[in-house]
Image (cartoon, coloured by chain):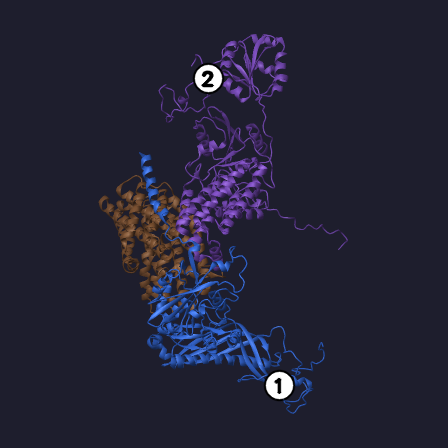
Amino acid sequence: MPGPYRKPLRAALFRRRKPPGQQDKQGQSQGSKAQKAPYPPLEAYQLTAELKLNLEQLQRIFAKCSDVVHRDFYLGQAIKAALFYIDGLVDKKLIEDTLMRTLQQAPPQLARELADRTRDLAAVMETIMPLTDVAVVDNMGAVVKHVLDGDTVLLLDGYNKGLALSTRSWEHRTIDEPITESVVRGPRESFIESLRTNTALLRRRLKTPSLKMELVCLGRYTMTNIVITYIEDLADPAVVREVRQRLERIQIDGILESAYIEELIEDNPTSPFPQIDHTERPDKVVAALLEGRVGILVDNTPFALIVPTLFVQFIQSSEDYYERYYLSSFLRLARFVALNIALLLPAAYVAVSTFHQEMLPTNLLVKLASQREGIPFPAVVEAIMLELTFELLREAGVRLPRPVGQALSIVGALVIGEAAVSAGLVSPSMVIVVALTGISSFAIPSFAMAITLRLLRFIMLILAGTLGFYGIMLGLLAILVHLNTLRSFGVPYLAPVTPWNFSDFKDVLVRVPRWAMNSRPSQIGYRDPVRQGAGLKPTPPASSNPPPEEGRS
Amino acid sequence: MREEGYISPRQAAVLLWFAVLPTAILFLPALLALRAHQDAWLSVIVATLAAGAVALVVYLLAQRFPHHTLFQYCELILGPVTGKTVALIFVLAFFLLDAVVIREFSEFLVTAVMPETPALFFSLSIVAVAVYAARNGLEVIARCTDFILPLMVTFIAIVLLFATPEMAPRNLLPILENGFRPVLGGALVSWSFLGQIFILAAYGAFVNPPRALRASLISGLLGIAFFLSLVTMGTILVFGSCEAARLTFAAYALARVVSLGQFFERIEALFLAIWVGGVFIKITINLYVVALGLATVTGLKEYRPLVAPLGALNVAMATLLYRNISEIRHDLLLVEPGWTLTWQLILPLFLLVMAWLRGKRRTGI
Amino acid sequence: MKARLRLALALLLLALMLPVLAGCWSRHEIEELAIVMAVALDAVPGDQVRLSVYVAIPRTIAGGPSMGGGGGGEPPKAGEVISATGSDFAQAARRLESLVPRRLLWAQNRVLILGEELARQGLHYLDLFTRERQMRLTTPVLITMGEARKVLELPPGIELMPGTILTGILRNRTTFKVELKDLLAMWEAPGDNPVLPQVVMTPTPEQESREVRSDGEDKGQKGAYKEEGKKTPPEAVAIKGAGAFRDDRLIGWLDERETNGLMWLRGEVREGVITVTLSIQTGGNYPGQEQGQKMGQTITPDQGQGQPAGPVEGQGQNPSQNQARARTQGQASVIFHRASTEVKPRVEGSQVTFNVEIRGNCDLTEATVSLNPDRPEHLLAIQEAVNRAVEERVLAAVRKAQQEIRADIFGLGETLHRSNVRYWRQVQDRWNEEFTRAKIQVKVDLYLNRLGMTNRTPGKTLDIGGKGATQGSTR
């Protein structure tokens, strides 16, 4: 609506959303597809032909923004023009050397042509515009968005349209090794906070036009660019559609990290288990895309999301696919064992030592009993205390600067453990159990799953402390039922165990050799099940000896 | 009310296995040894053959009414009033069965594992988890079995394997010492457990395709017979028929005998944990069937709200049903065979005959 | 409204969980337990029974940090023996709990020892040990002459506790092992009677000398129990012999040989050594006789005790140097690793005959009489001797069982049951009497296979089987 621009009330922005299809009081249908600009009415402000008015409005909008640069100049010494950009987001050299120089030194003939206003601005400008990425803007909302994105907006006097020129360039981290997922063998590139760089990393690996990148803009104040990426032939269109719908229904203040999106598009938000995987590694995203999954890249964060996600993915790591399959299979099994240990070991220890002492071999029982002489706490309490201490130590280690933190947490754990044992507060066997559990939870590749297990471990501890093995089994059954109810974008969470698919097991507990991985995971890549040719197992030539020479034996 | 999920025929067979085996391997061998002495394993085989009759009836009824549960086609066959009454009888029978299972479960845990804990606690806790599972539907229950089945099978195999040093084959002789009558007597006792395959009539409607029910039934029955006879035979081989009759909890006693080296012994607590998983499935599927049946009979659209109250009622029923374990044994030996015969064989047979006479059938869904 | 319902349900769940917090009933902390390692059952006068348990003291066994270096002098006790009496064992167990500051854990019990008096009264009290959920049916059961409690007071040796000592000895398989479930099976089967291995306490030579040297203290019989606070006398324990029951009462004892025969007959023999005495009779010319002529040396098994051989009386020969050192009387021992026993009953009219066939392979392990097993007749002689020895033992056991015990402790009735059901049905009620009339024929077929690392016995030879072997001696 025209008129002086006014900031709306904050409350009005977050009024409860009505279900789609209904009309609100103003008669406008809510829930439209496009994300509205921070100041809803801005699109309605059209550019006028008077440069002065446009500039006034722009300056009012960007009042007190000291990093906005406004440059007036004459195009071809004839037409008054103005450039608008935000310092820090643009490549100033490009603007100064290329853009300004070309435009200022444009031949006067051009200016005369421009005086003829019936000719299209864009077509004319295409003859002298040195920059490549050019968009036409006709309303204030678009102008503001482009300026905030890092484009330079060129406004001409006498034209009610402007040009947005892509001059984006800003400081960002260099592409370095992934911090959370480093491997011994494999590419060492990781995503960075710049969306375009990230998409480029994907493009470099998937050189096919089927790799689609759909753009969505979320966050009223952050206007974060989000890219949905998938391979068109492989991904389930229903999943892609679902992803797009869920993203577009998000109405939020700002998206700072992909975790915000993760929590907003999950299938089962009340479940403690992660249902969406995230990664810093481009090769992991590409592998997922090749299986038929959909990736979500979010600006300003190196963590990309992958949907749909299955439980088994949380014990897989990229390195499995780059090392030989014997080692990978062994490590996978070890990780699976680590998963169980991380969840069950303290609980099992408590259950066995307080309820089912007959299970222990006599020597072990006697040793344990002698260790626990004089310990003032029951085993359950001891276990919970030690676990909590361990958690605190771990958390403290994260906060400290990197070189100090790791050493401190290890030393701290040892020292505290030793001191507690000497003081007679805990038994040495409990320290061992807690340490083993901690180590196992670090062995799980996915941090999200490790955290979940940490929480569940406490519940299992309490159950074990009250009901022994029966309690542990109850807890496991409850977890099992819960896991079976989870779906990730329509795919059952516990595939391939349920629904059972034998061929999918080639990548679950073991990794079969590369030449045996002929099919994609059935629940996800069913559109094109065959991944590679059948007879790929390498066979050496029949004989590596050279044929005998003539005349010799 | 209509379950949205479908289960595969294989899962149906596995559910059948779970619907019979967990409590059967615990209680049945002792009762069989009482009746048939060292021929107890023959009783199992005979009883399985007899259970084939139930399977046949269930299959024929399912063929006539594909994708209809037992409660639905009761009504179709016998008309609204009589049909609903008969369906209600079935619901009550399953309810009683569930209560018996819960009671057996808590009795075992209290006696063998944690005597100080009140039995009510066990019933409540397991039914709470069972309610949670049953509310989520048949598909979830079937998926859980995919995890628990390998555990149970492995553990039974381990127990049987490692109890082999303690086995004495001569305990099985002389075969058929007193003729065939004790075997038949034992078979009758097994009937109280084996007839429970009838539960397939209630959830068989959700198996896709209906024709595969035959394979499910046969493989389920064979699996049950195989494991049950193995465990029974194992019990007799290890303990001898006289002692086996004295042991109330047979499979548990077998697990206690296992000793491998000096280290791997006294593992019965593990057996207990895994067995709890098996009984959990049995309780859940029964609870689900009861809720489904009640919802069908009363015409409700959703069965989910009924599950929790029925669970609570089941716990109460389990506590009130018997006074002590002697009553349970008495019931299993003398009462259950007849009762199960009635509602799991004769009544469905009646239904089948009526359906055939009246020409009622449904094609498709 | 839905939220309220959820709230109500949540509160209900919370309320249900409260009893959990109040106290977990079956939870017993591991340090609150008294671990019972051995159980001894006795009868005391006054129609009471006494339950003695050996409770382990974990502190001393594990030697935890609080122990530090071992105190000078006597090593700390690994456990304590605690007894309580009562009218039956459940009552005694209850009374026991009033003597022990911790809760008794029966699940780790290693052995059950019955006293003689108690066993003579019957086995009915064992019901506690099958009904109680912590007791295990795989516990070995032993019997002892006299009081069972004394066995628990063994001093520690290689193993720290009597329970472990006894199970260790049982594991050596020199004697048969009867677990509780086997005992019950033997008891309940109509054609079998229980028999239990016997624990014997013997004084060590140190103790005997100490008894001689002691000042004025009257030790009484061996293994006298000292007062509290003083050192328990060092004793050795052995498991040899057996106690035989009829139905459920202890009737008599079998000594080592008879027990061995019992084991053979029951087929419970695992490994074992059989020693036989042999004597050589030399005859004929020597040396330098032609080959092929009978060497004239025969080896015969000797029934009597072997005397250490002295020099051979010349029997018409030149006592050459070689012969002077020959041993003509001695023993040979064979070791066998597995043997099988098969019992075949045969019924003729009312006479039952059991044909026992014992088969196996054995290896020569020691020969103190000079012999050369390469010669077939020597080998055969040893084999014969071994077979006869086994047969003798079996017959000795059978004699004992038929004449003194008058009960079938071999399970032959069950064998009959399995093969001749009809006849069994007639006699099963009075089988023990029928058994005394039964005939048992033993045929032993133990083949001597291997000879160990050497073949003929060492020493200057009698030229057994060839040229004089005096050449080529190393020294």
Tell me the colour chain B is drawn in.
Answer: brown
Tell me the colour chain C is drawn in.
Answer: blue
Q: Residue furthest bottom?
A: C316
Q: Pointer 2 indicates a residue of which chain?
A: A
Which residue position holds label 1?
C310
Relative horizontal placement of residue A297, taking residue C435 as reference (left or right): right
Which residue position holds label 2?
A42
Relative horizontal placement of residue A188, taking residue B286 as reference (left or right): right
Return the residue nearer the eye: A375 or A349. A375
Task: Estimate the spatial distance between the alpha carbons at disc 2 and disc 1, rounded to whole Å.
Answer: 128 Å
* Picture disc at residue C91: none
Tell me residue A56's x, y (percent). 50, 11
Tell me the colour chain A is drawn in.
Answer: purple
Return the residue nearer the eye: C453 or A485. C453
Residue type, mark 1 in image: Gly
Residue type, mark 2 in image: Leu
Tell me residue A185's x, y (percent). 61, 41
Relative horizontal placement of residue A65, taking residue B87 as reference (left or right): right
Question: In the rendered image, which quarter is residue A132 located in?
Answer: top right
